[in-house]
Image: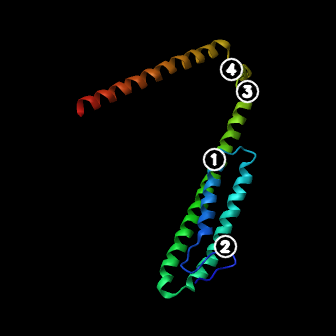
């Protein structure tokens, strides 16, 4: 009837049931990957990668066996092997995308922790500016004038932004 390889693939009417089963197993592992905790995610990733590598090695053997099929069945056999290759490549890409998202997420968490670890105090910064100004010889009166001007400039900036938004709204309202 059909030849079979050492990996258990039947090659008569090339029905690679085991590689399809392996692909489905990897897909179920991908589901576990999304729900696994931080400690075990690397173990699951390694397991998935090992299974994907196993699928690829089995596909190489299947491709050799499919070329040995009778001519009338060879095209169908190669088509099935190509479909399995596509599925395995899709799983490989999905794993890489997950690993990339995980790395980005871990980097963002590290950056967030670094920012939270820093202490930002407005009073401390303000005191440092006053100390530097005093060293430069600026009087307290000049410093108060600078602070007052900065306070007024903030309101001018907010008023300008609001006025710009109103003008843009009116232009859009009347020109369309």
**Residue assigned mark 1:** 34
Rendered view: 90 above or below 43? below
Q: In the current view of this chain or complex, which residue is farthest to the top?
A: 141
Instruction: Tell me which numbered mark, 1 or 3, is placed earlier along the sequence.
Output: 1
Residue on which disc 2 sits? 57
Q: CA distance from mark 4 to mark 3?
A: 14 Å
Which of the marked residues, 3 or 2, is nearer the chain's N terminus? Answer: 2
Q: Is there a contact, CB below 8 Å, between mark 2 and mark 4?
A: no
Secondary structure category for the residue under label 2: helix
Residue 96 visible? The answer is: no
> Circles 2 and 1: CB distance less than 8 Å?
no
- Residue located at (74% from left, 31% from top): 117
The image quarter containing residue 59 is bottom right
Q: Position of residue 32 (x, y in %)?
A: 65, 49
Q: Quadrant of the N terminus?
A: bottom right
Element at label 3: loop
What's the CA distance linking mark 1 and mark 3?
34 Å
Q: Identify the mark at residue 119; answer none if there is no mark.
A: 3
Identify the residue at horizontal 57%, vertical 86% (top origin). Answer: 68
Residue pictured at 63% horizontal, 59% vertical: 26
- Foreground residue, 165 or 19? 19
> Which numbered marker is on residue 78?
none
Picture coordinates of residue 23, whole percent (x, y)? 60, 62
Q: Is residue 107 above or below residue 122?
A: below
Q: Is residue 82 above or below residue 30?
A: below
Which residue is label 4 attached to? 126
Q: Are marks 4 and 1 in contact (CB under 8 Å)?
A: no
């Amino acid at each position: 009837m059909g030849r079979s390889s050492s990996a258990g693939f039947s090659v008569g009417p090339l029905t690679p049931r085991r590689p399809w089963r392996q692909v489905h197993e990897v897909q179920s592992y991908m589901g576990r990957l999304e729900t696994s905790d931080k400690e075990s995610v690397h173990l699951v990733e390694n397991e998935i990668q090992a299974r994907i590598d196993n699928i690829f090695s089995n596909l190489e053997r299947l491709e050799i066996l499919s070329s040995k099929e009778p001519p009338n069945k060879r095209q169908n056999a190669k088509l099935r092997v190509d479909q399995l290759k596509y599925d395995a490549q899709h799983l490989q890409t999905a794993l890489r995308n997950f690993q990339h998202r995980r790395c980005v997420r871990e980097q963002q968490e590290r950056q967030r922790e670094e920012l939270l670890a820093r202490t930002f105090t407005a009073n401390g910064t303000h005191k440092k500016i006053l100390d530097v100004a005093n060293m430069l010889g600026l009087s307290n009166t000049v410093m108060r004038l600078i602070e007052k001007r900065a306070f007024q400039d903030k309101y001018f900036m907010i008023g300008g932004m609001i006025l710009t938004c109103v003008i843009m709204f009116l232009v859009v309202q009347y020109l369309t």
